[in-house]
Image (cartoon, rainbow, N blue to C red):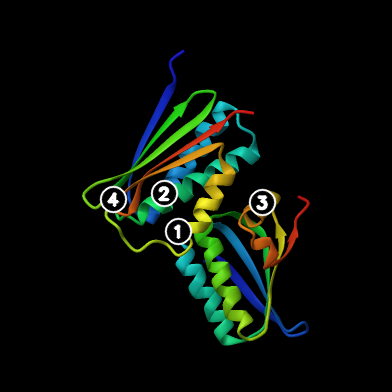
Amino acid sequence: MLLDANYDEGHSTWDVHLYGEVDIYNAESLKSELHALIDEKKADIVLDCESLKYIDSTGLGVLVSALKKVKEAEKQISIINLKPYIAKIFTLTGLDRIFAIEVSDK
Amino acid sequence: MNSDIIRLSVPAKPDYILAVRLVVSAVAERVGFDIEDIEDLKVASAEACTMLLAAEPESIELCVTVNNGLFLKFVAAGKAAGVAADREANGELSQYLLDALVDECDFISGGGAVSAVTLNKRLP
């Protein structure tokens, strides 16, 4: 499992924690899990990446796919606690302009 | 001075890209790259492999040459290598990342698909 998710009734958001390393091996699995959440309830998603150690372009593709799906319901994905070396990947690909990103200072 | 060379061959399956990343990061650490450069090399190696997997080869052959940094050559080997296959929708992202993360990168194409990728990252 790459994530655990809880629906925050107070803020009407999905609080999602991502774990480990996302690459071509498990990106499809992450996509299924994220899309299942969105199908269950259309809400903003807060993606906590404190425990995310690695992501490549296939993982970024999954996040973009999830973003497209939530935007259809006029919702948003924000990414928090991103490690600086992973934030760099978002910046290089221009994805920092389509996700609301908060970088960890750790 | 002769360059040290490390070779690795993995089946062309997503399962083994992790092994490629681990080898590259271990050698990069031993050569003296800092943490940030090692992370760059891990991502660049995975992107190179992802591009090659699109050609559906039998294996991916990696040759790492240690010479004032790392020169990495990834080759798609086996019967289907070089045959055009459905490309990953995010192949463009892979190219952006490769261009940005290493000092030089080059692609060798055959039959409409990438059949080899070379990456060069020098020590600062």
Count the marks: how many? 4
Badge 4 marks a residue whose secondary structure is: loop
Tell me the subunit letter for badge 4: B
Q: From the image, tell me which residue sits under label 3.
A: A88
The span from disc 3 to disc 2 (Cα, nearest Å) is 20 Å
The residue type indicated by label 4 comes to Gly
In the rendered structure, are the residues bearing label 2 and label 1 in contact, judged by CB atoms less than 8 Å apart? yes
Badge 2 marks a residue whose secondary structure is: helix
Q: From the image, tell me which residue sits under label 2.
A: B49
The span from disc 1 to disc 3 (Cα, nearest Å) is 19 Å
Tell me the subunit letter for badge 2: B
Say above or below: B42 vs A89.
above
Query: Callout 3 environment at 10 Å: few (<14), some (14 to 19), or many (20+)?
Result: some
Residue that sits furthest to the top in the current view: B1
Badge 3 marks a residue whose secondary structure is: helix
| Identity of the residue drawn at 75% across and 55% down | A104
The residue type indicated by label 1 comes to Ile
Query: Callout 2 environment at 10 Å: few (<14), some (14 to 19), or many (20+)?
Result: many
Query: Callout 4 environment at 10 Å: few (<14), some (14 to 19), or many (20+)?
Result: many
Task: Tell me: A84 left or right of B94.
Answer: right
Indicate which label's residue lies in the foreground, 1 or 3. 3
Q: From the image, tell me which residue sits under label 4.
A: B82
Res A93 → quadrant? bottom right
Q: From the image, tell me which residue sits under label 1.
A: A24
The span from disc 2 to disc 1 (Cα, nearest Å) is 10 Å
Do badges 3 and 4 share one subunit?
A: no
